[in-house]
Image (cartoon, rainbow, N blue to C red):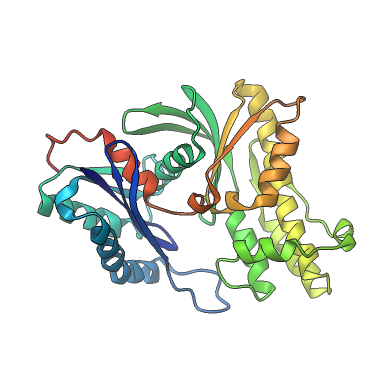
Amino acid sequence: MAILGIDTSAYTCSAAAVSQDGELLAAHRRLLPVPPGERGLQQATAVFHHVQILPEVLSEVFAAVPAARIRGVVASVKPRPVEGSYMPVFTVAAGQGRILAAALGVPFRATTHQEGHIQAGLWSSGWQPPDSFLAVHLSGGTSEVLLVSRKPGGFTIEKLGGTLDLHAGQLVDRAGVLMGLEFPAGPALERLAREAGPETEKVHLTSAVRGYNFSFSGPASQAERLLAAGAPPAAVARAVEQCIANTLERVLRPAVEATGLRDILIVGGVAANNYLRQRLRHRLEHPAVAARLHFAAPEHSSDNAIGVALLGLEVDPREKG
């Protein structure tokens, strides 16, 4: 038997199936098409693409896991597990999930995109968390520092702080598009940053932090000015990575001290960046801080439906959606 998970986020359409013992049976995802030179999609356009792409993604999952094996359907129906959280793209997963559950005669469970990220991070890192831990959700649509506790079928999440303007992924994409990189620019920017030479020491972006909150609009403007002034793109790419790492360090150090929680799970597409991982480990796992960092596997850091499916393992098969 299996659980089907569906996630239709701002730029990724995905579906996955997991067995009752948590084994991944199938996972497929497609990036929504973004025209060259653009830095994103309007929600109406993203919804249109999801409606076209989701049937294809589901067909790929059902080719590996016949519908007769599905005993429950889970979908992310909103971005975060808080009142008022809403994005139109998630109505596609919610609607299709309910239709499939009704057609198959199995339970339907609603969850959130953020809870799916956290669950995928726990699963892919192989880490068994304590009752409470810190988490960072770092992507193109979310940049938040969280206090997380487990509950049946999901998590209780308290937002400690986050961005006041641009998200970390938006900083990466804005700088990357200016350099002529494809959207989303994360992987290409990381490759470019590896080419940075000694000039990197002269290229910096400021880190704007206030308590547990931070800002990336200033660094985005600085990156644009640096590139216009002729700064080497590789050096600016490395400066973007350093800015995000420095910002997180300045937020997480006091969070560890104030909460007494030393375990930190870091998820989201931006968290796949290897330089960011290494620098944060070096700075935060130092004995002076003694934090313990846990990352989602790089291939499971970006948006996917695996965590969504895993959250459905607690669905009672006697319930009906």
Label count reads 0
At x 77%, y 25%, the residue is 288
State the residue in front, 105 or 220. Answer: 105
Q: Position of residue 96 (x, y in %)?
A: 22, 58
> Whole-percent x and y of residue 260?
62, 20
Left or right, 173 with respect to 101, comes to right
Closer to us: 24 or 169: 24
Residue at (58%, 73%) from the top-left corner?
Answer: 182
Up-down relation of residue 215 to residue 200 (above or below) = above
6 left or right, relative to 130? left
Q: Nearer the viewer, residue 177 or 163?
A: 177
Q: Based on the displayed image, in which of its 4 quarters is residue 210 positioned?
A: top right
Identify the image quadrant of the C terminus: top left
Residue 209 as seen in the image, left or right of residue 148: right
| Residue 210 in view here | no
Residue situated in front as seen by the camera: 49 or 2: 2
Tell me the quarter of the picture where residue 289 sits. top right
| Identity of the residue drawn at 71% across and 54% down | 241
Q: Position of residue 9 (x, y in %)?
A: 40, 57
Residue in the picture at 24% in, 61% down: 63
Quadrant for the N terminus in the image:
top left
Q: Give percent across and percent down for residue 222.
A: 76, 62
Query: Which residue extends farthest bottom?
Result: 36
